[in-house]
Amino acid sequence: MSKKILAALLLSLATAPALAADAQTRARALHERFPVLDTHLDTPANLARPGWNILDHHHYDEDGTQVDYPRMVEGGLDGGFWVIYTAQGPRTALGNRQARDFGLQRLAQIREMVAANPDKFELATTPEDAARIKAAGKRSVYISIENAYPLSADPSLLTAYYRLGVRMLGLVHTSNNDFADSSTDPKGPEWNGLSPKGRELVAQANRLGIVLDQSHASDAVFDQLIELSRAPIILSHTASHDLNAHPRNLDDARIRKLAAKGGVIQVNSLSGYLIPTNRSPEYSAELRALFAGYGGRQGLKPEQYKEVMAKRRALDAKYGIRQATFDDYMKHILHILDVAGPDHVGLGADWDGGGGVAGLEDVSQLPRITEALLQAGYSEQQIANIWGGNLLRLLKQVQDLADPAALAEL
Ligand SMILES: [Zn+2]
């Protein structure tokens, strides 16, 4: 090797890390310029954990959480939709009443988090709020519902939720309910899409200017929402079916239909939706038994967390379970961007709800996505739209199409 080549080689070795650091710095700096929002933050479920405080810096390895105020600041996440998630339970009068109470309690916890930290968080309800709250140095708290089960006993409660700040509604979770079919109910479709009660709820959401969220619902629900909804719809946390044929994902033909109607798909990072993970019913049963032995995930004490995770890793190894990587997640994002176009895609990574991949374990690492989008050739404006502009445009369209008479009655 000549001295000249050797010198060039040594120089390139020395500058490569510097260039990488530059790209990271540039990506992180972009997060200061526009609202960076995620449409599916399951973090409110942690607000009820004993001793857990949103203002403390937690570590994913230690307690499994992915979002708190210090990590939002670190990763340049300005907020997004904080979710009132209710697990589907019995569809009985008692079950419906318990779900009603649970939903209202979770809503109160989200509002209490904002009220207790007025210098750090602010309730957001309009598209304009995101930039204003960011300029004030605070984080946006938009509120959404995942699973309309709490509305089963009394769908007119949607008006109360609206008045208390809810601006997005997902009809169903992993099993069918009174409003719609789920994409993953082992029993298959019950309504062949939306139920009559579900159709009424869609109309009411349109009247109030609440964004309809199709994530978790069946393809038939997607087709019916596209026809029925007066306003464009969102998929708050959904990945690509053409890359991984999981029923929870959306196929390219439907992604194109969504975009043609002005809708937006926010890409999910949950490992089991991104790649075939090799989960079997036997594995799932053992995993459930593991957590049940500790009184369920929510009952887990911080000091038990490491022990449980070690057992879980052993279980994953025994069954050969695969874990998606950052590259797997970027493949879904870039594919959906190709199919929908950059004006119809955003991010809803399912933080604190099962999302996160190897190399993107919590929100402090979000600039990695921005860096990858820059490398893929997306412009800063396009990236601003992906991180929030598209969502805020959709929110404006939905709110502009609300019925002024319905809002005047509130
Ligand atoms: Zn979900």
Image (cartoon, helix red, strand yellow):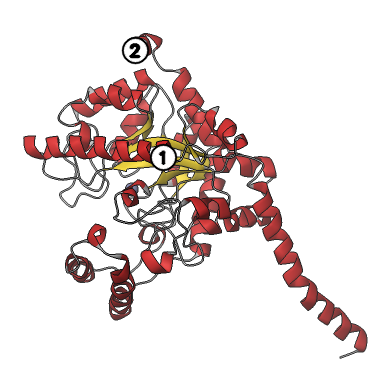
Q: Which residue is mark 2?
A: 406
Q: How many marks?
A: 2
- Counting from the top left corner in percent of width and height, residue 213 is at 37, 36
- Counting from the top left corner in percent of width and height, residue 45 is at 31, 49
Q: Assign a secondary structure to mark 2.
A: helix
Q: Nearer the viewer, residue 237 or 334?
A: 237
Residue drawn at (24%, 22%), measured in percent from left and top? Answer: 200
Type of amino acid under label 1: Ala
Tell me: residue 316, above or below residue 53: below
Residue drawn at (51%, 48%), measured in percent from left and top? Answer: 336
Tell me: residue 279, above or below residue 174: below
Residue 302 visible in the displayed image? yes
Dot 1, crowdedness within 10 Å: few (<14), some or many (≥20)?
Answer: few
- Counting from the top left corner in percent of width and height, residue 249 is at 37, 50
Type of amino acid under label 2: Ala
Dot 2, crowdedness within 10 Å: few (<14), some or many (≥20)?
Answer: some
Q: Assign a secondary structure to mark 1.
A: helix
> Is 23 left, or right, of 409 in this rendering?
right
Quadrant where the N terminus sits is bottom right
Residue drawn at (30%, 36%), measured in percent from left and top? Answer: 108
